[in-house]
Amino acid sequence: MIDHTGGAVRSGTRGEFGRLIPIRPATGNLVACLRGHRLDLDLYDKLKPYSHRYRLHGTLCEVCRAQDGCDPGARRLAEWAHLDVTVQYEPGAAPGDGLVLVAHAPVAGTRAGRIELHLDGTEVGAVTASPCVSCRGATLDYVHVAADYRRLGFGRTLVAAATARAPSYRWTAPLPDGPVAKSFRARIAMRRNGLPCHHPPRMRS
Ligand SMILES: [Zn+2]
Ligand SMILES: [Zn+2]
């Protein structure tokens, strides 16, 4: 790969370090690659590359790499990076480089917290969610990923970051309009609106 930038400046513009690779929430047991090739049976090689673009560790499936090489038009799925969704920085405390999650506490009088995905300090996606301690339930209100950063797993990683804050809660999500949003929503394993919550937002301590 030719690096036309000389590697001197990281501006956060997509493409500077080549095409962005997909991301996935980090999980302890990696069973299969993004195309479903088994990684746990020692059938073929897998590598553990480091993404300097994201500043995250990742996995590269050798079977996929060969497949990507055969079909230049295919989506690049051989390599992906792992983001630990339990690591969420407070605003102003996040590293300025790489891909990180930044969590904003709910605005006073509301329950909706916001988690942003930042790439080199620039917001590229966000999720808002409203948990209720009394109901032990939470609503996934809104997921957005900037147009240039879609189909990379950013949205599903944001959803995982939201649920990681209240993993034992019963999560629900509304049904959005539009084919892209519907397609994304249909892959999230959450039922639509649960019982209405009438509890007042908890005061921030
Ligand atoms: Zn593969
Ligand atoms: Zn409630």
Image (cartoon, rainbow, N blue to C red):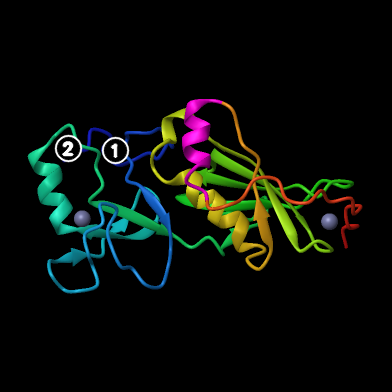
Q: Is residue 132 left or right of residue 41?
A: right
Nearer to us in this view, 16 or 23: 23
Residue type, mark 2 in image: Ile
Label count reads 2
The dot on residue 19 is 1
Work out which quarter of the rendered image holds the N terminus and state it. Answer: top left
Q: Residues within 10 Å of mark 2 (few under 14, many from 20)?
A: few
Residue 119: image x %, image y %?
48, 44
Q: SS for tag 1?
A: loop
193 vs 62: above or below: above
102 vs 43: above or below: above
Q: What is the distance, in whole Å, between disc 2 and disc 1 at their CAs?
A: 12 Å
Nearer to us in this view, 60 or 94: 60
Helix, strand or loop for the magenta stretch, by majority? helix
Residue 50: image x %, image y %?
30, 59
Residue type, mark 1 in image: Arg
Q: Residue at x 22, y 51 (%)?
A: 78
Q: Residue at x 32, y 60 (%)?
A: 58
The dot on residue 2 is 2
Q: Residues within 10 Å of mark 1 (few under 14, many from 20)?
A: few
Q: Is residue 41 left or right of residue 88?
A: left
Q: Earlier in the sequence, mark 2 or mark 1?
A: 2
Q: Residue at x 39, y 59 (%)?
A: 82
Q: Which residues are magenta?
A: 178-188
Q: Quadrant of ligand 2?
A: bottom right
Q: Residue at x 43, y 37 (%)?
A: 12
Work out which quarter of the rendered image holds the C terminus and state it. Answer: bottom right
Ligand 1 within 8 Å of disc 2? The answer is: no
